[in-house]
Amino acid sequence: MGTFKKGLVSIIIPTLTRRKTESLQTLLRKRYLLEDCVRDLTRHVVIPHEVIVVCNSFKDQDLVRFVTSSPDIDRFCLNSVNVGVPRSWNMGADLALGEYLCFANDDVEIGPGALEAMRAALEADETAGEVGPAGGKWFRRQSGARVGVSRVEEADEISGWLFMVKRSVFDAVGGLDPAYTPALCEEIDLSFAIRQAGYKCLVLPGLNATHHHISGASSTKRPICAFDMQWDRDRLTERNRGYFEAKWSSFWQRDDRG
């Protein structure tokens, strides 16, 4: 565990090559990619922060050129292959200097006041370990009701497209579990680990943030490509949820949900 800068928010953004026309599902959506995300962070975030990009598209020279030359990106990691979501988040955290770690998809539009409100919520409650704009309950293999729609509420899991964690809590739980590589269920697992460590996961309603669903595991039904392999989504979902259920079965029993 290193020494981190008090009050600093480290914004960690994994990225891949994205094209608006990759999926019919994205054709009618607003084109919002890494360049837009970084631009809006510079415009809108007024608290001390740093931007860290983990680039999993080393062969995309246009993307690499932007990541390595943008004055608004403080540090970056260039991977020769897509290492998947949990490893990317852990790599970003290893590069971070902040007391708070904010994880964002590269297609998330962060407006004025959003990150300020997230940091303030963590600062105000020593028992809070994780916050985000969306989350819900979780019952074994099934997601439950969404919470925090009109008021701050505790959740079993915080959605992975945007969330903030205290660095001390992230280190205490050991970061993300790479067993979920390349993706799916890793953010739910992190929330469970945070709650098992005795901290709360809070949903903050009304945050000025929009997920455009251009990127991320849920943006398309195509296979996930990582480590130069293709991963069928249905099989990957079954594998990861089975691992998740086995890992947290005792926690469910203690929580009187088993």
Image: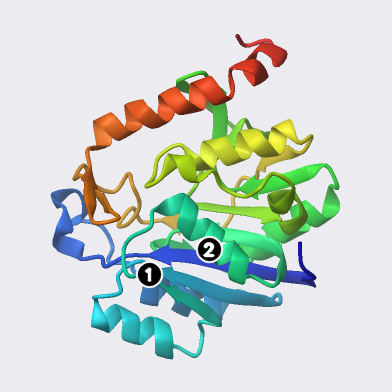
C-alpha distance separating marks 1 and 2: 10 Å
Residue nearer the viewer, 126 or 193: 193
User: Is 232 left or right of 258, judged from the image as shown?
Assistant: left
Residue nearer the viewer, 207 or 187: 187
Q: Which mark is residue 79?
A: 1
Q: Which mark is residue 212?
A: none
Residue 208 percent across, percent down from the top left: 55, 59
Q: Quadrant of the N terminus?
A: bottom right
Q: Quadrant of the C terminus?
A: top right
> Could you say which quadrant of the image residue 100 lies in?
bottom right
> Could you say which quadrant of the image residue 248 lies in?
top right
Give the amino acid type for the residue marked by disc 1 in the picture: Asn
Which residue appears at 38% of the width and 71% of the height? 34
Circle 2 Cα neighbour tier, 10 Å, few/some/many (<14 / 14–19 / ≥20): many
Residue 28 percent across, percent down from the top left: 19, 56
Q: Earlier in the sequence, mark 1 or mark 2?
A: 1
Cβ–Cβ below 8 Å for labels 1 and 2?
A: yes
Give the amino acid type for the residue marked by disc 2 in the picture: Met
